[in-house]
Image (spheres, rainbow, N blue to C red):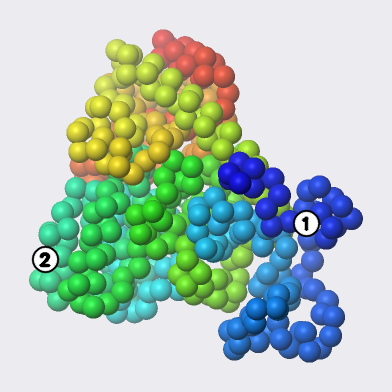
Amino acid sequence: MHYESEMMSLGYNPEWSEGSVKPPIFLTSTFVFKTAEEGKRFFEIAYEKAKLNSEEKMGLIYSRINNPNMEILEERLAFLEKSEDAAAFESGMSAISTTMLAYLKPGDVLLYGNPIYGGTHHFITKFLKEFGVEIMPFSSSSKNDEILSKLKNKSIGNKVKMIYFETPANPTNTLFDLESIKDLKQSLFKLYKKEVISVIDNTYLGPIWQKPLLFNVDLVCYSATKFLNGHSDVIAGCVMGSKKAVSPVKTLRTFLGGMIAPYTAWLLTRSLETLSLRMKKQEENAKKVVSYLLEHSSVKKVLYPGIKSMGKSQTEIYKRQCLGSGALISFEVGGGEQSAFKILNNLKMIKLAVSLGSNESLAQHPFSMTHSDVPNKIKKSIGINEGLIRLSVGIENYEDIINDLKQAFNK
Ligand SMILES: *Cc1c(COP(=O)(O)O)cnc(C)c1O
């Protein structure tokens, strides 16, 4: 079936719980084994001392390792991403940091796309660097030849272990070319005969509008706090990919303990039932808001994937790799911080808050809020100016969203 239909029942059988149509919340830390032999066998499988044979089924042990709510959720997440496996976490940052720690050891090189989510940036540049991982940034305009020759000059090309990036970039909506990252990975393999793992943060457009696994990306990370949950009431994260690629992440999760809790998993499972409806409505609304902003005389610039003003090469990348443009719009007004703050302070329905992808519209000021940690010079060089506002469009009636902007602009 299609994903909209599968989200109603995949991975759950009403017979497990008195015919209950929806999965209950399995608030338990531990599970009863039928026999001691069964308990022994489950541990052998969980700790990878043995593999399941064809007529065996893995059972539940302890909720840090597995729990029905986590398993139902993971099955649905894998279905949405069309991946073999998924791992769910208590936050997006837990998913991202566990993935990095599962693959990177001191001495390895991490190539990372810039700009990147602030928390991820901090983890890479502060924690991983101190931990002994060599880090090297690249941008959406970096050519593969430049990256490869830089690695060669530093004699570190053979140490590259991971390419990590985010597209579209926040808050500029600049796209990284998935084909080009695939080529970079292949070139590194040809030159150094070492497997490099590519990892994308797909929070902004996935899983409906962007499918990176089709471009041979190995692992797809999410802050499920955003579109996947979409109700601003949960912090959660996940990682999807092949069984082989997800396996080290799941193993480390068992020991770092960032697995999703049963109640969080249950809420997120419920949200996935309406994911497609929400994301499609949010995009429809966002396009109407973009049209309004493009016509407004006080708006200097609108940043939104796929629109003409993003430039020819960006619209070409958009056509190749995006199925839709999503619900995040950035726009710049003249008059810098003063004008931007005046608009933000005068919004009535749209809430002044960070975060994104929720069913209600949110607005914030990247320069002084989500990106306040980024040095001013870098912010300006990538187009994060004092007059820039980021809008995450919700599912309200679009006329009310536009009217709210209109009255704030008028003030
Ligand atoms: C919010 C966000 C994160 C961090 O996720 P949390 O759920 O807040 O831990 C990571 N990446 C992106 C792109 C985000 O927007």
Give the percent coordinates (x, y) of residue 20. Answer: 85, 50
Q: Mark 1 or mark 2, which is nearer the start of the sequence?
A: 1
The answer to which quarter of the image holds residue 250 is bottom right
| Residue at position x 38%, y 23% in the image | 290
- Secondary structure type for disc 1: loop
103 to the left or right of 356: left
The answer to which quarter of the image holds residue 152 is bottom left
297 to the left or right of 50: left
Give the percent coordinates (x, y) of residue 343. Answer: 42, 21
Spatial CA span between label 2 and label 1: 55 Å
> Is 278 above or below relative to 241?
above
Give the label on residue 365, or none: none
Give the label on residue 13, or none: 1
Give the label on residue 149, or none: 2
Give the percent coordinates (x, y) of residue 85. Answer: 54, 64
Ligand 1 within 8 Å of disc 1? The answer is no
211 to the left or right of 11: left
